Structures are given as structure tokens and as C-alpha cells.
């Protein structure tokens, strides 16, 4: 048992701590990054994380749900840290970002496939930076000796031609919405989603003038208000299937959300199977288990026969 347990809840962060003889476990939820989605609540094996819906105030936009974590139940496993699409949760041991479930290979990590080919990037273009709804992209121009150039308009054409472009992306916070990829005119960005799924909004079931889902959606462009009927619709090209909209929707049948696939590093784990069942569909879990079974059978055959399949 911990020698001391602390929980601090401020406007900026929710902090949980365990103090043991030689270890200090700490979990920090950054409220500025949290969007009140479903992922951590569904993934938590201890059911220590709960969503608290905020009351709707007449005349104001809907607010995303708040996260609360039960200190008596949480065991600092780090699964919420691993799966948070927005990097809002950070779990440390003695100040280091060490996740035991990853070290023991009992849980996978999300594959955030984000690539930027700066060789194609014009020096005067910042489209990807301006397009990112979460301000995670920073474009800088460098001289040959590595100095940052702030004002390229003052440069000659020759000086501009000698500049190099650098694109910094906060990948650990990127939910891979792909907006930067589609907004970039030069095909510099390449992004692949890690959550795949299907989302449907049934406008005939939506309450009149309701835009709660649109109010809380963190990805600008994933949901939009139709000029024709003033109803909210989804653009699945940019939807990351986090479920923030589903949480605040006042009518269960109005919004349908299913996660069908999660891109992750290889793992063989009962803990992951259970998390996958809660996060995605039972069909997806069955497909993944069958794939693992086939791989295991192939490895067994290879071992017996002394050859490797190609």
C-alpha cells in the first residue's frame, strides 16, 4: 500500500499521486488538452475514469465533458496515457515517463503515422501550420548555417532559394485528423489515422437547433452545420472517432459511432483484447484474434519444419 495518496484538482490540471518507499507514481491530466472524449474511460481496465457531463446553459455553447479519476481505484498502469488521442494524460514513475505495460510488452502503442516531405515545401508556404485545428505544427525557415529566418519578405529571390524548410509536429498530441494533409497544396504531409470507424448523424432525430456535438468537436471541419436545414453533419474524412460528440449528444439515437480498427504496435495481451473489445466492435476484436492465431500457427509450422515463410 502507498505511504501517502494525494489528489489535486485545479482549473488547469487533475493530479493523482502515490508515494511509496522508493517510488513516486504521478498521473497528470492536462485540462487544456482534454476534450472530454470516450477513449480513456472505455480503455481503463479498473473503470477508475468517469465522464462528468456539464450542464447546458441556455444561450451558450455546449461544454465538453470533464474527466474525473478515482484515486482509490487507479493503479497508474498508464493505459489511459497510451491511448489518449490528444496527449492529455501523462503518467510518470519517479519523474520519468515509464509505462510498465509497455515495458512488459503487455499493451501496444498507437501508431501515429505522420510524415512531412520538406523537400517539396515552398519556403513561403505555411498552409499546414495554419490548417492544424490544434496548433500542433510549426513551420520554420533556416539558412544554410541553421539560423531561423522570421521575415522572408525582406529576402531576395536568391536568398529565398537557399533557405531550408523545417516542419515540427507535436506527434504525441496529434489525433491524426489529416486536415493538414488535405489543406497542403504541395502534398508535403502524409498522415494515416490510428482510429478507424464509422460515424453517422441522423438529422431527423436531432433536437431543433441543437449543435452540441459541433460545439465540442475539437477537429474543425469534422462536423459542420448545413446552411440548408441548419442540421449538423459529419465529414468522415477528418473525423478521428474520439467520441467527444457522442458524450454530449442529448439523444442517443441521433449520433451513431463505431470504431472498427485501431492501428497499433504488435502485442499479445489479454489486457489489450479487453480494451479493444470496449473501444471497438466485438467483430474487430475477433478479426484481430484470428489474425494472431494464424500468425502463431505459422510460426509453429516454421519452427517444426525449420523454414521461414515469405
Image: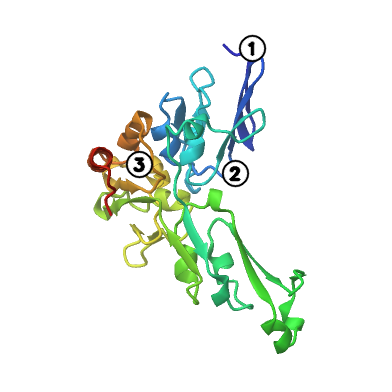
Of label 1 and label 2, which has the lower sequence position? Answer: 1
Q: Measure how far apart labels 3 and 1 are at the Cα level.
A: 43 Å
Work out whether residue 207 or residue 18 is closer to the camera in this orientation and state it.
18
State which mark lies toward you, 3 or 1: 1
| Pointer 3 with pointer 2, Cβ within 8 A | no
Near mark 2 (Cα within 10 A), the count class, few <14, some 14-19 or many ≥20, is few
**In terms of secondary structure, where does tag 2 sit?**
loop
The image shows residue 188, relative to residue 87, as above or below, that is below
Near mark 1 (Cα within 10 A), the count class, few <14, some 14-19 or many ≥20, is few
Q: Measure how far apart labels 3 and 2 are at the Cα level.
A: 24 Å
**In terms of secondary structure, where does tag 3 sit?**
loop
Work out whether residue 70 or residue 171 is closer to the camera in this orientation and state it.
171
Q: Position of residue 307 (x, y in %)?
A: 27, 46
State which mark lies toward you, 1 or 2: 1
Q: Measure how far apart labels 1 and 2 are at the Cα level.
A: 30 Å
Relative to residue 26, is residue 116 drawn left or right?
left
Relative to residue 109, is residue 201 drawn left or right?
left
| Pointer 3 with pointer 1, Cβ within 8 A | no
Q: Which mark identifies residue 177?
A: none
Which residue is identified by label 2?
32
Q: Position of residue 258 (x, y in %)?
A: 29, 46
Q: Does the rendering let one see residue 309? A: yes
Which residue is identified by label 3?
250
Identify the image quadrant of residue 32: top right
Q: Position of residue 232 (x, y in %)?
A: 35, 57
**In terms of secondary structure, where does tag 1 sit?**
loop
Work out whether residue 54 or residue 257 is closer to the camera in this orientation and state it.
257
Residue found at the far front of this picture? 306
State which mark lies toward you, 3 or 2: 2
Q: Position of residue 195 (x, y in %)?
A: 38, 49
In the picture, the quarter occupied by the N terminus is top right
Amino acid at each position: 500500500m502507498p505511504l501517502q495518496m494525494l489528489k489535486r484538482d485545479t482549473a488547469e490540471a487533475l493530479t493523482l499521486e502515490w508515494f511509496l518507499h522508493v517510488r513516486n507514481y504521478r498521473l497528470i491530466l492536462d485540462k487544456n488538452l482534454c476534450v472530454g472524449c470516450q477513449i480513456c474511460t472505455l480503455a481503463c481496465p479498473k473503470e477508475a475514469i468517469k465522464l462528468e457531463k456539464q450542464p447546458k446553459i441556455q444561450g451558450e455553447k455546449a461544454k465538453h465533458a470533464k474527466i474525473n479519476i478515482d484515486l482509490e481505484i487507479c493503479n497508474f498502469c498508464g493505459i489511459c496515457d497510451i491511448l489518449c488521442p490528444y496527449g492529455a494524460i501523462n503518467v510518470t514513475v519517479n519523474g520519468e515517463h515509464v509505462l510498465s505495460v509497455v515495458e512488459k510488452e503487455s499493451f501496444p502503442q498507437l501508431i501515429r503515422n505522420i510524415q512531412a516531405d520538406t523537400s517539396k515545401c515552398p519556403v513561403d508556404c505555411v498552409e499546414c501550420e495554419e490548417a492544424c485545428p490544434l496548433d500542433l505544427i510549426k513551420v520554420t525557415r533556416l539558412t544554410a548555417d541553421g539560423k531561423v529566418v522570421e521575415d522572408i519578405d525582406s529576402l531576395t529571390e536568391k536568398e529565398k532559394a537557399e533557405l531550408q524548410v523545417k516542419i515540427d509536429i507535436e506527434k504525441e498530441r496529434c489525433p491524426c485528423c489529416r486536415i493538414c494533409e488535405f489543406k497542403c497544396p504541395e502534398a508535403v504531409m502524409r498522415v494515416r489515422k490510428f482510429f478507424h470507424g464509422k460515424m453517422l448523424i441522423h438529422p431527423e432525430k436531432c433536437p431543433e437547433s441543437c449543435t452540441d456535438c459541433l460545439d465540442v468537436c475539437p477537429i474543425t471541419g469534422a462536423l459542420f452545420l448545413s446552411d440548408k436545414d441548419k442540421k449538423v453533419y459529419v465529414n468522415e474524412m477528418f473525423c478521428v472517432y474520439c467520441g467527444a460528440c457522442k458524450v454530449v449528444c442529448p439523444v442517443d439515437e441521433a449520433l451513431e459511432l463505431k470504431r472498427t480498427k485501431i492501428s497499433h504496435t504488435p502485442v499479445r495481451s489479454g489486457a489489450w483484447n479487453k480494451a479493444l473489445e470496449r473501444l471497438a466492435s466485438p467483430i474487430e476484436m475477433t478479426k484481430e484474434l484470428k489474425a494472431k492465431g494464424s500468425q502463431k500457427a505459422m510460426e509453429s509450422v516454421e519452427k517444426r519444419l525449420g523454414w521461414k515463410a515469405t
